[in-house]
Image (tube, rainbow, N blue to C red):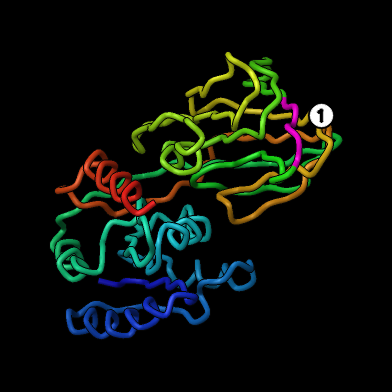
Amino acid sequence: MRFGILVNETKPQALELKSGLMDWLENKGVEVVCPGDIYCLETTGMEDVRDSFRGLDLILVLGGDGTLIHASLVLAGLEVPLLGINLGHLGFLTSLEMDNLHEGLERFMRGEYRVEDRMMLDVSLVRDGEVLEEYLALNDAVVSKDAFARMVDIEIRIDGQKVDRYSADGLIIATPTGSTAYSLSAGGPIVVPSFSAMILTPICAHTLYSRPMVIPADALVEVELTKSSSEVMLTSDGQTGVRMRVGDSVRVKKSDRSVRFVKFGDRSFFDVLHEKLSSGGRNA
């Protein structure tokens, strides 16, 4: 077997774990690929990382949900499954904790696992009919005002048809994977990750009737900024962002690329949901 390792180099614990983990895997007869300087927020060198990971059996991601999201964006479409090892706080997307790391890896090597395909979003910012920026998102695309601004006015169209127009702090367009992230905090529904859909969740809408919507995954969502007196941002997975102007539109559709996560059969989505959300509530 051939494994790759991606490390959140801002976490000392992850760097310490990498060294011992490489030795442990090599003793098990696993060839380990671990490029240098692999976790960064810049795009320089990311294609080299993709090339070095082609054809592997597994990529281990050491960090937390943020690290796994970043790895998903870099490696989307490679068809190599990712296994997240949680060194962070909540760890909703990761599959293993430190106390069951070796046991989980041995189960993978015995073939006792499943692979889940997670849909992703193609996100575009359009100004005066031209695409200015394009992003890939695993969790969500968010149009939102800054902390001290008044509400913004936005219009939503689905497949070219006007659906809603309201004043709000913003709007979240999420995947089922992202339904347990920002969208959940804003009052959106929880959607099973294997379901193919998009979730539209208003952020503090100033109306009685604007509610979250679950729509088909193959729909084209357009969000136009029709009025604003302050700064408005489009952000993708909370990792990249760009300022918007009145008249700009955000177009969101299901991406042709996807990411594959390794999961183990003894924990269902609902087990993880109860464990993580209950833990988050106690820690809050």
Q: Is residue 51 left or right of residue 142?
A: left
Occupied quadrant, residue 177? top left
**Percent position (x, y) of residue 48?**
55, 72
Mark 1 closeness class: few <14, some 14–19, many ≥20 residues within 10 Å: some
**Percent position (x, y) of residue 149?**
75, 40
Residue where numbered disc 1 is placed: 227
Residue 149, placed above or below residue 93:
above
Residue 116, placed above or below residue 70:
above
Residue 238, placed above or below residue 222:
below
**Which residue is pictured at 47% across the width and 52% down the height?**
77
- Residue sitting nearer the eye, 203 or 179: 203
Occupied quadrant, residue 41? bottom right
Which stretch appears magenta?
149-154
Amino acid tagged 1: Lys
Occupied quadrant, residue 7? bottom left
**Which residue is pictured at 70% across the width and 19% down the height?**
165
Q: Is residue 278 left or right of residue 174?
A: left
Total numbered badges shown on the rendered structure: 1
Residue 110, placed above or below residue 242:
below
- Residue sitting nearer the eye, 47 or 194: 194
**Which residue is pictured at 25% across the width and 51% down the height?**
263
Asked if residue 215 lies in the magenta stretch, the reply is no
**Which residue is pictured at 84% across the width and 36% down the height?**
229
- Residue sitting nearer the eye, 42 or 213: 213
**Percent position (x, y) of residue 39?**
51, 72
Quadrant, the N terminus: bottom left
**Percent position (x, y) of residue 78?**
44, 57
Asked if residue 151 lies in the magenta stretch, the reply is yes
Q: Is residue 247 left or right of residue 75?
A: right
